[in-house]
Amino acid sequence: MNIEKYHHGHLREALINEACQQIEQEGATALNLSKLAQKIGVSQPAVYRHFPNKQALAISVAQTGFEQLAEALQKTTQNVESDAFKGIRAIAKAYVEFALNNREITRLMFSMKERTTEPELQNASKAAAVPIFRIVEAAKRCERLRNNDVVQAVRIIWAAIHGLGMLLMDEQIPSVTQSPDELSDYIEATARTLHIGLFVV
């Protein structure tokens, strides 16, 4: 057993990381605490001390996914929050890249009903929308948001970008996912359409 190498509390993080790999390779339904314990080299009771069941681990995986998505969106919009079009385009690019690079994790994140009942997961989910709120709020301050409804604009932007990401994840537009140039064109067109529809150009 390798439990001694986790004596500083790193076992929880190691379990989440390994679970992410297992889900990405086999899908969320294949998540198995026994297999995780064996893969990491610890006893099952050691796993249960951190996660009493598979669902608890899945919630933590989803939370980690939202935290990583929020970080990616925040990083990509740091210098473009004052330019609505560039901000939306950056959000769309980062969002789609995350979805395509983490397909099964993304499916898990957005399929969990616990997003409305588990405070930490709910907060992580909301944090992923913060970069979009900042772009829209900046436009409103400059009187460039058409209807001045920040929440509605954020939801429309999120829905459009999320929808594109899901279509690409499910290979509904295979010609796009297989062509970096075409993918870039779709992201550009999505951002342009949202910008024209929601902001004063």
Image (cartoon, rainbow, N blue to C red):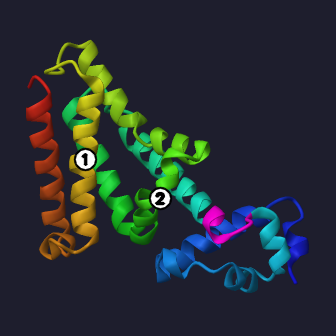
Q: Is residue 54 magenta?
A: yes
Q: Nearer the viewer, residue 84 or 146?
A: 146
Picture residue at 25% right of the left edge, 30% below the top: 152
Task: Find the distance from the CA under tag 2 to the CA under tag 1.
Answer: 17 Å
Quadrant of the image containing the N terminus: bottom right
Disc 2 or 1, which lies upstream in sequence? Answer: 2
Q: Is residue 162 left or right of residue 12?
A: left
> Which mark is in front, 2 or 1?
2
Q: Please give the name of the residue rendered at 14% of the width and 71% of the height, measured from the top-left corner.
A: 173
- Using the image as rendered, state which of residue 6 and residue 152 is in the foreground: 152
In this rendering, the count of numbered labels is 2
- What residue sits right under mark 2 in the picture? 112
Q: Say if 165 sits above or below 48 in the image.
A: above
Q: What residue sits 91% from the left and 73% below the top?
A: 4
Instruction: Tell whether 96 sits left or right of 114.
Output: left
For the C terminus, the image quarter is: top left
Position of residue 79 in the picture relative to residue 3 (left or right): left
- Taking the spot 68% from the left edge, 85% from the top edge, the residue there is 35
**Secondary element at image label 2:** loop
- Horizontal side of 51 relative to 143 (left or right) equals right
Disc sitting over residue 159 in the figure:
1
Task: Name the secondary structure under disc 1.
Answer: helix
Could you say which is closer to the camera, residue 24 or residue 87?
A: 24
Segment colored magenta: 51-57
Q: How would you rate the neighbour count of disc 2 (Cα within 10 Å): few for under 14, some for 14-19, many for 20 or more?
A: some
Tell whether position 114 is magenta. no
Residue 22's x, y, as percent? 56, 79
**Depicted 1 relative to depicted 49: above or below:** below
